[in-house]
């Protein structure tokens, strides 16, 4: 049995969800993969927990849920994210702080510090990848550690591991996808129920699918970030957020959706990389095309030289769903 | 550079397609994966080629195309499939003889012989897997070699590698899919063009999408075979073809498709494994559901405990497309 020590940096919805899933699936992963996942550190902005003998993930999860992390017997104010990364002897740092697309911080510093301390990094955080992809890859390589980020695009939907582990002989020629569940929900409701944009948005806000300030989603910025990561990792580009031509969904009317529907099409917010050009815009999609998925689903289509078009669909959000991708990366690292 | 010697047994459309793709992608795979794929043997019913210094894959492909394999300078009548497997020093045997769902032969003997000669096996052949799955897995394990069959279900669409390499922390709870492109084509044409079953079938036959005797496809037997392989490998069952409850598409009328369409549904031939029960039958699918893909596409949906529903779509047939899956297996074996 191979023991893998994990620190989680950023213990919000995603980070504490990873802890919950480690607890739930620890025996399954031992039995199936011969890997014992042990949580040894948790780092937050205002302190953290370091315990080389293991932290009970469910105890930590429950404290996070009631926002009482500082009541944990091992909680120390000086043990913030950076210090946990430096001082706790973890094999893998799971970085799940919130996305910041301007500076990439605090995730970027967390990741660089982890690499320099010879720790592998697994992350769901898009920010550092959208602003400093090449630098991160280079620093990981220089320190001979692995860097994986399956959860940063598409939540539970395998994207990078699909290309890396299942389509190895293929050259990927272009990528297209619905990468934002909020926009997909709004367009689906407008299309199937004949709701106005404003009505569908306020419904999504009531259901917690859209934020109070929805602009990051509906104006296409979130999709653009994910597209940058896809283009760099899968197509070998060196793009940043600024290279993306972006149009959101705020201008779409019920009339245009009806017109599309009469011709057998639907309208979706599509992120697309082709011939080194990155674009996010509403596009017509034939109703029986694999990209035409409804609700909050995410979907990605890869155009390849051997396999033709391969499309994958899954839940783009949710703590447990995202943990599926994080643990896939953790297990892949542990197996090498 | 790691050299991997390959024999191809069964040099028809798929087998010679693999040779063509090895030729086309050899440099790409060297550069990207550090693996040099060398073809060292080809085995057919009536003879074959053994050449430890390497067979030119394109020369062999061209001779296969014009059905003149015996004109190859190294062709020997005594070097049939079994003898190539025994005598040629290959690391991996790629078995691409036609599917026989009654006896599994000649594939079954080919695979067993390869295992006993300590050679890994990669196959697209459903027959042996549908009749002797457990025996094959056991014999491969006893001989400490690998057995992979990504191409046996869904053509280019990753199925087994998706579960094995991308969803490792998940328990798979059930599987649903469209696993036969011929049936999907016929139902799509009936639904979108209002064609009768007979008309759509004869169109499919003219296009080479359906066989002259289409019963293996349209009566659901092909889907049933693939379902057995999925159930055994992904859900850990021990089923055979006889355990599947099968209903084909021959009874579906335009009227039923119209009725379904008015309610927002389409009808698809779905293979499904749930609670140890295997069924193939026409089913209603909501039009914006990820399973509702048109044309000759294949699609598979996995219900998982962490990731929720993950759906993948791709081309279910074609020599180059199938080679994508075969080479994925070959590279995965080479990397261990």
Image: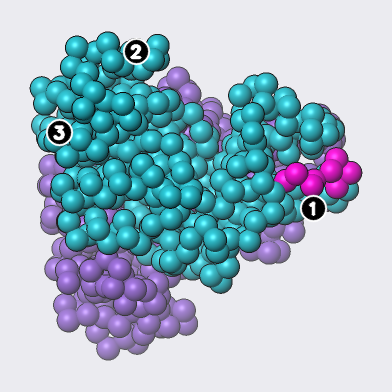
Chain colours: A purple, B cyan
Q: Residues within 10 Å of mark 3 (few under 14, many from 20)?
A: many
Q: Residues within 10 Å of mark 2 (few under 14, many from 20)?
A: few
**Height in image: B48 above or below B134?**
above
Q: Nearer the viewer, mark 3 or mark 1?
A: 3
User: What is the chain letter for disc 2?
Assistant: B
- Return the residue at label 2: B68
Q: Which mark is residue B88?
A: 3
Q: Which mark is residue B63?
A: none
- Gap between marks 1 and 2, in whole Å? 68 Å
The residue under the point 43% across, 36% down is: B98
**Do discs 2 and 3 belong to a common subunit?**
yes
**Height in image: A234 above or below A128?**
above
> CB under 8 Å between callouts 1 and 2?
no
**Do discs 3 and 1 belong to a common subunit?**
no
The percent position of residue B134, horizontal first and vertical second, equals 35, 62
Q: Is any atom of residue A211 visible in this view?
A: no
Secondary-structure class at tag 3: loop
The percent position of residue B316, horizontal first and vertical second, equals 52, 37
**Height in image: A65 above or below B3?**
below
- Give the magenta range: B249-256
The percent position of residue A70, horizontal first and vertical second, equals 34, 82
User: What is the chain letter for disc 3?
Assistant: B
Near-viewer residue (B145 or A39)? B145
Near-viewer residue (B219 or A146)? B219
- Return the residue at label 1: A199
Provide the major secondary structure of the magenta segment.
loop
């Amino acid at each position: 049995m191979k023991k893998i020590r994990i620190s989680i940096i950023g213990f919000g919805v995603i980070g504490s969800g990873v802890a919950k899933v480690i607890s739930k699936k620890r025996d399954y992963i031992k039995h199936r993969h011969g890997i014992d996942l042990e949580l040894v550190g948790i780092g937050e902005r205002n302190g953290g927990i370091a315990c080389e003998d293991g932290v009970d993930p469910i105890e930590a999860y429950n404290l996070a849920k009631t926002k009482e992390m500082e009541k944990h017997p091992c909680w120390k104010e000086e043990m913030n994210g950076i210090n946990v990364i430096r001082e706790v002897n973890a094999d893998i740092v799971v970085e799940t702080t919130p996305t910041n697309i301007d500076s990439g911080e605090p995730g970027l510093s967390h990741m660089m510090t982890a690499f320099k301390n010879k720790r592998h990094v697994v992350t769901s955080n898009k920010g550092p990848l959208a602003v400093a992809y090449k630098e991160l890859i280079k620093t990981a390589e220089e320190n001979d550690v692995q860097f994986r980020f399956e959860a940063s695009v598409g939540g539970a939907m395998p994207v990078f591991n699909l290309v890396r582990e299942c389509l190895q002989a293929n050259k990927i020629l272009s990528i297209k996808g619905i990468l934002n569940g909020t926009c997909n929900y709004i367009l689906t409701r407008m299309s199937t129920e004949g709701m106005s944009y404003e009505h569908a948005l306020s419904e999504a806000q009531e259901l917690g699918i859209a934020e109070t300030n929805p602009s990051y989603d509906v104006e296409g910025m979130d999709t653009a970030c994910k597209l940058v990561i896809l283009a760099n990792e899968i197509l070998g580009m060196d793009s940043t957020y600024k290279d993306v031509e972006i149009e959101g969904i705020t201008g779409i009317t019920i009339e245009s959706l009806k017109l599309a529907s009469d011709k057998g099409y639907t309208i979706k917010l599509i992120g697309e990389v082709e011939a080194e050009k990155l674009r996010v815009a509403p596009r017509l999609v034939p109703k029986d095309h694999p990209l035409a998925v409804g609700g909050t689903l995410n979907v990605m289509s890869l155009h390849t030289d051997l396999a033709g078009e391969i499309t994958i669909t899954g839940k783009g959000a949710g703590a447990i769903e995202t943990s599926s991708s994080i643990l896939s990366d953790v297990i892949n690292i542990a197996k090498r």
